[in-house]
């Protein structure tokens, strides 16, 4: 234990704390040996090991030692800095030191959890500790820069998640831009018939919220719109939104639908997207009766006027003096400034044709569950009748669970909602057709309020449950039926069940363009393609990009109650940020030591944010601290070593390298 | 069993992708070789070629740089700068007699915990097979600096 004279001439007294994290670290690493080792390192005045450093008593230890031992630098070897760096910087600050006189060693995620050899893991721990102790002595007192937060918010996606988050924020008095790329808000929930387990009708609970979002004075609703570009940083994002033409003047149309009736297409001929192609629409249409906004739109792909310019334009005649129809509308862009962003971009259903042995797309009476939602829906293409393609009612229906979920060939994860919606569909099919319903499942997962009770209810109604994964679906010889071949694992036999209709309980996937969206907002995704939260438990709606939050299925499959809860949480996080008024930025920006700068301009093109300029009269480069985001790319490029990155100074990194290599 | 050679590998991981991937490997309890020592930087673009040369000079048997996939860089294009420098650095390393397998640049996203495991294990195996790094003569700090400067300068000329 000794004092050390640091590079800048001041005495440095380092305190080292090795966390056990219960047995998470101490089970693999000899924490006592590590503390003893740390105590021998130059500059270390005191080294301790402690059960839980992040606990209050753990943090108190640091504060007490700073006061009693005159510590001037703190090293904590515990979990990932992504988890607790903030905690310990705060403790360091509370102890009276600059919070950046601290460095963290990742003993858990990078050592004890990934290695089994205790000796090797302990040796690695020593190397990492040595590096931290060597590095921390160079740490300088830094100030966090405060930036103000623009109180306006952007919410991307107008499904139930986006709507709920928008209403929550708008009710709190914040101005919200709600951007939806489809012609109507409502998302997938608008396509559902009833919702499990209470069987309340989706439209009855959703459409009032849709209308509220449209009419709320604090919400600017843009449909047929997509975010093109996002620039800036927390509190100060500049967003460019592409607004696609509706070919209808939104301020004039009242949604009377007379133009739709007047269309020269007397019969609806175009496959209707909202009904998943099970119904037809005209080229001028409203997606569904309760669409919000209540505005028609024209599909230029099928409209005769767009294709040939020779249409009689009976729609225009019908609109008469309103003149709401505008064939010349162009795409345009809106630039907005917002402080926070909530992504609620939802999911795609699994494409069932990717599993050819279930025959979707080959056998007409194989449906996806979402298609069945439209069939059982009173405002759907069959007015709520469950009908086969030939218009007859099915007498038997098979529901295949886990299509595109829990499957090594497609998605390994459980989509969480399919069991419950399959039970609901079984109930609705039985109610509407009195058919025999066979649910073929791997496990029934009903872990929610009232879910298990609903499962029992459906079982008692007479739905057949067969535990087994269906091997394939093929036509039953000599009939119009389909055979499901399945191993009934409870009866230990292979069964062949003939049914009139097969329903595939398709799973939930990330949106097909989720990766593009993710890049646009500078966030990460998890292995399955869903957006990655900052921490699965402690920051489930935050992302690694400050000021960008997640709600709903874009973060992972979830049901409506969970989606709404998460949307509320995302809104609360955004509101907390806004109401704080300002946010502190990490001080890891770069600056130029003028006397060393040769004015070579090497750094200038390195910066993706144009933060570096050349000051002509001084012949030196200068970094605008406000624009610098602290990547350090210019630092690595500077031939004269005149650029310094706070927290990642060359001397700090070099000493860290020497430290891990035990180089004297 | 005879003592097998345990190489020391210094890794420079960017804060946003590869460091998080290594965290994910941890939370997923994936097991990999304990020969790697991670230095966290904000961006792979921060990796000064001097860091790599310095690590070799001071006893590393291998150096691994981990950054975000092309198009995914948290700072837009720092990883491209890292890539360009890595290409040039490799030619310098060859001249110094440092084999290709001892220096590696990998794109590992925050979701690829498993890739951290496979890359580290693979690199440890390859470097172990090569044996300890014996530099003909330990480069002086001046040599290290001179090489590094030629690389950054060339990277700029290469059309930054």
Image (cartoon, coloured by chain):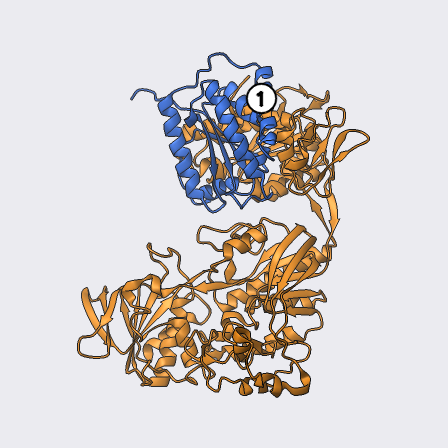
Side of A132 relative to A32 (left or right):
right
Task: Give B131 or A300, whichever is nearer the viewer.
Answer: A300
Q: Is residue A661 above or below residue A567?
A: above
Comparing B99 with A324, the one in front is A324
The residue lying furthest to the right in this view is A617
The quarter of the image holding the C terminus of chain A is top right
**Secondary structure under badge 1?**
loop
Quadrant of the drawing holding the N terminus of chain A: top right
User: Mark 1 sits on what residue?
Assistant: A41
Image coords of residue A616 (percent x, y)? 79, 32
Chain A shade: orange
Q: Nearer the viewer, residue A423 or A371?
A: A371
- The chain painted blue is B
Residue A452, visible in the rendered structure: no
Residue B27 in the image: x percent, y percent? 46, 44
**Residue at the spot x=23%, y=66% of the render?**
A486
Seen at 71% across and 43% down, the residue is A627
- The total number of labels drawn is 1
Q: Is residue A9 visible?
A: yes
- A170 to the left or right of A347: right
In percent of width and height, residue B36 lies at: 46, 30
Q: Residue at x 20, y 69 (%)?
A: A495
Query: In the rendered image, which quarter is residue A324 located in?
Result: bottom right
In the picture as drawn, the residue positioned furthest to the top comes out as B137
Q: Residue at x 37, y 82 (%)?
A: A386
Image quarter for residue B119? top left
């Amino acid at each position: 234990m000794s004092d050390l004279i640091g590079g800048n001439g001041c005495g440095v007294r380092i305190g080292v704390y090795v966390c056990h994290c219960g047995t998470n670290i101490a089970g693999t690493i000899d924490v006592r040996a590590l503390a003893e080792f740390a105590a021998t390192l130059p500059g270390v005045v005191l080294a301790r090991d402690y059960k839980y450093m992040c606990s209050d008593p753990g943090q108190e230890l640091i504060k007490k030692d700073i006061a009693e031992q005159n510590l001037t630098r703190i090293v904590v070897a515990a979990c990932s800095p992504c988890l607790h760096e903030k905690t310990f910087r705060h403790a360091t600050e509370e102890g009276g030191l600059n919070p950046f006189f601290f460095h963290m060693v990742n003993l858990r995620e990078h050592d004890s959890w990934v290695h089994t050899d205790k000796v090797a893991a302990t040796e690695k721990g020593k190397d990492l500790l040595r590096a931290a102790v060597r590095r921390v002595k160079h740490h300088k007192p830094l100030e966090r820069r405060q930036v103000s937060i623009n109180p306006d918010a952007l919410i991307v996606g107008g499904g139930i998640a986006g709507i709920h988050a928008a209403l929550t924020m708008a009710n709190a008095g914040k101005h919200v831009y709600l951007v939806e790329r489809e012609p109507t808000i409502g998302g997938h929930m608008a396509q559902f018939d009833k919702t499990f387990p209470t069987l309340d009708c989706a439209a009855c609970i959703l459409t009032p919220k849709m209308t509220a979002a449209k009419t709320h004075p604090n919400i600017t609703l843009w449909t047929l719109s997509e975010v093109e570009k996002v620039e800036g940083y927390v509190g100060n994002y500049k967003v460019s939104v592409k607004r696609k033409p509706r070919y209808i003047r939104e301020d004039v149309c009242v949604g009377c639908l007379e133009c739709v009736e007047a269309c020269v297409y007397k019969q609806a001929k175009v496959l209707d997207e909202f009904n998943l192609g099970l119904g037809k629409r005209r080229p001028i249409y409203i997606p569904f009766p309760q669409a919000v906004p209540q505005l028609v739109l024209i599909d230029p792909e099928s409209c005769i006027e767009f294709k040939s310019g020779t249409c009689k334009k009976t729609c225009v005649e019908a609109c008469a003096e309103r003149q709401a129809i505008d064939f010349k509308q162009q795409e345009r862009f809106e630039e907005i400034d917002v402080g926070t962003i909530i992504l609620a971009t939802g999911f795609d259903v699994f494409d069932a044709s990717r599993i050819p042995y279930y025959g979707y797309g080959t056998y007409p009476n194989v449906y996806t569950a979402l298609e069945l939602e439209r069939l059982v829906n009173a405002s759907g293409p069959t007015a709520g009748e469950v009908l086969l393609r030939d218009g007859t009612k099915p007498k038997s229906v098979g529901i295949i669970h886990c299509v595109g979920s829990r499957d090594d060939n497609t998605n390994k994860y459980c989509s969480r909602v399919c069991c419950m919606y399959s039970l609901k569909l079984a109930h609705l099919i039985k109610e509407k057709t009195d058919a025999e319903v066979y649910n073929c499942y791997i496990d029934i997962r009903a872990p929610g309020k009232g879910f298990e009770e609903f499962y029992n209810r459906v079982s008692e109604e007479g739905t057949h449950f067969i535990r087994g994964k269906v091997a394939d679906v093929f036509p039953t010889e000599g009939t119009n039926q389909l055979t499901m071949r399945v191993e009934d694992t409870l009866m230990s036999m292979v069964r062949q069940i003939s049914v009139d209709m097969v329903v595939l309980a398709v799973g939930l996937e990330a949106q097909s363009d989720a990766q593009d969206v993710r890049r646009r907002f500078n966030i990460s995704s998890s292995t399955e393609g869903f957006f990655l939260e900052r921490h699965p438990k402690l920051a489930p709606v935050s992302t690694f990009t400050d000021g960008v939050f997640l709600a709903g299925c874009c973060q992972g499959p979830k049901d409506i109650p969970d989606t709404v809860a998460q949307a509320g949480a995302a809104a609360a996080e955004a509101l907390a940020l806004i109401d704080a008024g300002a946010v502190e930025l990490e001080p890891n920006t770069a600056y130029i030591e003028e006397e060393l700068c040769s004015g070579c301009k090497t750094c200038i093109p390195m910066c993706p944010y144009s933060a570096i300029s050349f000051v002509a009269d001084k012949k030196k480069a200068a970094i605008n601290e406000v624009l610098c985001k602290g990547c350090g790319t210019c630092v690595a490029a500077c031939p004269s070593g005149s650029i310094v990155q706070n927290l990642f100074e060359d001397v700090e990194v070099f000493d860290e390298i020497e430290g891990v290599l035990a180089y004297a | 069993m005879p003592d097998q050679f345990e190489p020391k590998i210094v890794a420079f991981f960017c804060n946003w992708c590869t460091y998080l991937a290594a965290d994910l490997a941890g939370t997923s309890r994936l097991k990999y070789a304990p020969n790697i020592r991670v230095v966290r930087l904000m961006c792979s673009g921060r990796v000064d070629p001097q860091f790599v040369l310095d690590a070799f000079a001071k006893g590393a048997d291998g150096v691994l740089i981990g950054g975000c996939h092309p198009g995914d860089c948290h700072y837009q294009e720092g990883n491209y700068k890292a890539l360009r420098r890595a290409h040039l650095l490799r030619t310098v390393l060859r001249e110094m007699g440092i084999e290709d397998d001892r220096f590696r640049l990998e794109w590992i996203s925050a979701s690829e915990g498993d890739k951290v495991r496979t890359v580290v294990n693979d690199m440890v195996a390859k470097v172990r097979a090569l044996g300890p790094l014996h530099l003909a003569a330990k480069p002086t700090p001046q040599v290290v600096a001179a090489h590094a400067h030629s690389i950054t300068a060339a990277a700029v000329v290469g059309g930054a």
